[in-house]
Amino acid sequence: MDIEDKIAYQKRKVLGMLGISAKAGKIVCGNDATIEDIEKHRVKLVIVAENASERTKKNIKGICDKNNIPILEFGDIDKISQTIGKSNKAIIGIKSKSLSEEIEKLIKEFGGDLLYG
């Protein structure tokens, strides 16, 4: 398996974990809902889509910095939204510590961008 295949495999694995997390009720999605749960200390990791607007990225990064929450750039809005069964979601908050750790590890392995953490 070459490096491109390994990256594609790990991206599919992350998307699968996001789907499972959504079905288990372990995520929050959308800007306002994610920010609310960050401030209530329910979110362990934030994922922001690579094609989210710079304003969205800057806003969520500031809130994550303030609350010491790691934030990673991963995937695109359409793929993430489809995976979690929602539409037009650029921001996902992972509420499960174990799932957040596994997802963060996988994203970092294939060079995902850590915006904070």
Image (spheres, grey):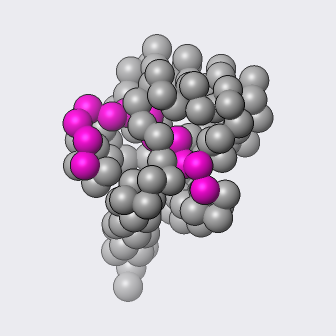
Q: Is residue 115 visible?
A: no
Give the vertical position of 103 relative to 36 (above or below): below
Q: Is residue 76 left or right of residue 64?
A: left
Give the vertical position of 69 relative to 1 (above or below): above
Magenta segment boundaries in residue numbering: 85-96
The image shows residue 100 at horizontal and vertical percentages of 60, 56
Q: Quadrant of residue 23?
A: bottom left
Residue at 36% across, 73% down: 9
Magenta-drawn stretch, dominant element (helix, strand or loop)? loop
Q: Quadrant of the N terminus?
A: bottom left
Q: Is residue 4 left or right of residue 85?
A: right
48 or 96, which is in the foreground?
96
Give the vertical position of 12 relative to 39 (above or below): below
Residue at 71% across, 36% down: 41
Q: Quadrant of residue 98?
A: bottom right
Q: Is residue 27 left or right of residue 20?
A: right
**Count the marks: how many?**
0
Residue at 65% across, 41% down: 42
The image shows residue 87 at horizontal and vertical percentages of 23, 36
Give the vertical position of 39 relative to 104 (above or below): above
The image shows residue 70 at horizontal and vertical percentages of 67, 42
Whether the magenta-drawn stretch holds residue 82 is answered as no
25 or 87, which is in the foreground?
25
Q: Is residue 92 visible?
A: yes
Q: Is residue 9 left or right of residue 46?
A: left
Q: Quadrant of the C terminus?
A: top right
